[in-house]
Amino acid sequence: VIFFTLAVHGCLEMSNFTETGFVTAATLQGSSIVNELSSGRAVCEFAGSLSTDKRFSVDHDPFHCRCFVREHGQPWVEAREVDQWGPSVGSSAGAASTGKGDHFAQENT
């Protein structure tokens, strides 16, 4: 049972790493803290607004995401940086969906 748990956990971490460039799930949640993305502690940055009583309300969607994708999830392949600004591609507020190769290209976000 212990070895099975370790194998499943190892596969999950390897999958996270090959698909995003990050190992822990906590980094995939995103953050509204300044410099979390640039320091590598978060995949996405969220903006928000400050209410009259000084309470910060985080936006629903992130405004900037950066991850490192490997072709077909292969860990030995060099990672390609995906840097996306703005709404998700294909969303009602974002750019129109395009082919898989340029889906996350800067001009399509």
Image: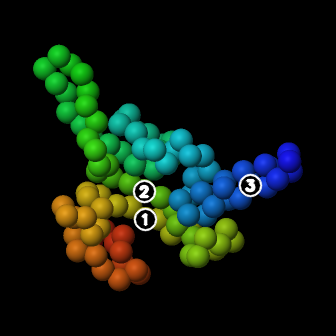
Q: N-terminal of the two: label 3 or label 1? A: 3
| Placement of the C terminus among the 4 image quadrants | bottom left
Q: Secondary structure at mark 3?
A: helix
The quadrant holding residue 74 is bottom right
Residue 38 visible at all: no
Asked if the residue under mark 1 is in contact with the one under mark 3, i.e. CB atoms within 8 Å, the reply is: no
Does 96 appear above or below 8?
below
Q: N-terminal of the two: label 1 or label 2? A: 2
Q: Residue at x 24, y 22 (%)?
A: 55
Q: Secondary structure at mark 1?
A: strand
Callout 2: few (<14), some (14-19), or many (20+) C-alpha neighbours within 10 Å?
A: some
Callout 3: few (<14), some (14-19), or many (20+) C-alpha neighbours within 10 Å?
A: few
Q: Disc 3 marks which residue?
A: 8
Residue 106 visible at all: yes
- Between marks 1 and 2, how big is the CA–CA gap? 6 Å
Q: Residue at x 34, y 61 (%)?
A: 84
Asked if the residue under mark 2 is in contact with the one under mark 1, i.e. CB atoms within 8 Å, the reply is: yes
Q: How far across and down, in percent of the image, does residue 96 sit?
A: 23, 74
Q: Amino acid at mark 3?
A: Val
- Between marks 2 and 3, how big is the CA–CA gap? 26 Å
Q: How far across and down, in percent of the image, does residue 107 sit?
A: 26, 71
Q: How far across and down, in percent of the image, does residue 53 sit?
A: 17, 16
Between 12 and 2, the residue placed more toward the observer is 2
- Between marks 3 and 1, how big is the CA–CA gap? 27 Å
Q: Secondary structure at mark 2?
A: strand
Q: Disc 2 marks which residue?
A: 66
Does 56 appear above or below 106?
above
Q: Disc 1 marks which residue?
A: 82
Q: N-terminal of the two: label 2 or label 3? A: 3
The structure's colour scheme is rainbow
